[in-house]
Amino acid sequence: MNDIYVVGIDMIRFGRFPDRTPPQLAAEAALMALDDAGLSITDMQALYCGNLMQASNMVGQRLLREIGQTGIPVVNVANACATGATAFRDGWIAIRAGLYDMVLAVGVEQMGKGLLGGTDRGGFVTEGAIGSDTMPAMFAQIGLEHQRKYGTTFEQFAKVSVKNHHHSTLNPKAMYQVETPLEQVMASEMIAYPNTKLMCSVNVDGAAAAVIASEKAVRRLGLMDRAVRIRTSVMTSNPFAEREFAMPDFNAVTRLASKHAYEAAGIGPDEINLVELHDCFATAELVHYENLGLCGEGEAGRMIDSGETALGGRIPVNVSGGLLSKGHPLGATGIANIYEVATHLRGKAGARQVEGARLGMTHVVGGGPGMGSACAIHILEKV
């Protein structure tokens, strides 16, 4: 019995909470995940807490002050946009290694408005604030290169935002739940061509949490009816390149991670039923269709035109609304993506349910100029 499962998972509705602290937001999500599993903090053997802005402020220990200090080991994780996914993966690794049977993984961030908005920062800045225009410029360049090679159009990039904003109207936990017609997306303020303001991810506060358990614990506690199998967990950093660029190659790091993930899971991309991927900008989602093997080289524009990645399409992508509309609290995003996929695999996604979902993939990638990158992919399976 070597399988590992998610048995409890939840997230708070993403928004802005200036009167609350990251530990308080994390505590709410943690209690929701524990309640989902019918367990308490006393059942957890370790805590893995992801938070970027207060990486040195022991958010995990402060979280336990809110819900119960039981003496368990606490690991605080910071890994750019992959922070929450890294905390989740660390918990998975610990169970896989036989150290524990049941752990809690939490991701949380308080970002507020603007690149440097929010409170209780601990002196850190967001990934998007490495320079006032650095991240938009990088993902603009990625889009322009795709446009140069394959003729991808401004309208095709904009359709990503139209799709994800529509999906968010079906998700009560999304920050924004409004339609944005194509003309509105294309006419909004230009941030860095081809990404307009409505094609950029939303800075929000948020938290998500998951209870991860060994098969032995799941069977002992009778939780198999609500369990979601973690088919594989993969993480990569920048692969070696003959020529080093100032900007990290987000395509290469994702392609490497997806290759390892499919090999480890023993499946191909054609077997995946839904994907939550890192749409920090509309251009990012489109290129990741190809990076994750969802379509062939140069086919991403055709894929968005065809509706294949919309709810009801061949492989729905970001049915939650994605980072573009659900929001992107850096440390929470990785686990929030897992929550979305797990909810579909449980058949509990309501109006946005992907019918017949059996296998789902989550993807996050973080980093920036001079930083390198971190990519995490999880494949989850309905039991």
Image (cartoon, rainbow, N blue to C red):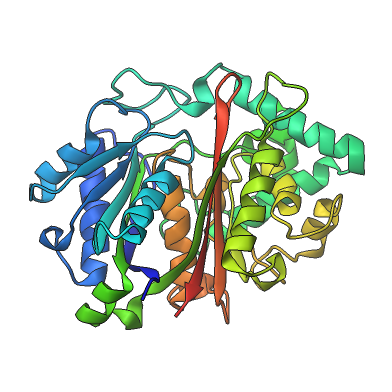
Q: Is residue 181 visible?
A: no
Viewer-side residue, 26 vs 47? 47
Q: Quadrant of residue 86?
A: top left
The residue positioned 33% from the left and 42% from the top of the image is: 108
Occupied quadrant, residue 139 = top right
Residue 3 in the image: state x and y as whole percent. Answer: 40, 71
Q: Is residue 165 left or right of residue 34?
A: right
- In the rendered view, tell whether residue 360 sits above or below residue 362: below
Q: Where does residue 87 sit, x and y in percent of width and height? A: 36, 46
Quadrant assignment for the N terminus: bottom left
Residue 250, how many percent across, how many down? 66, 36
Residue visible at 68% across and 27% down in the picture: 138
Q: Please, is residue 22 above or below residue 271 in the view?
A: above
Which of these two is toward me, 341 or 230?
Answer: 230
Rendered location of residue 280, percent (x, y): 59, 40
Residue occupying image coordinates x 81% and y 64%: 306
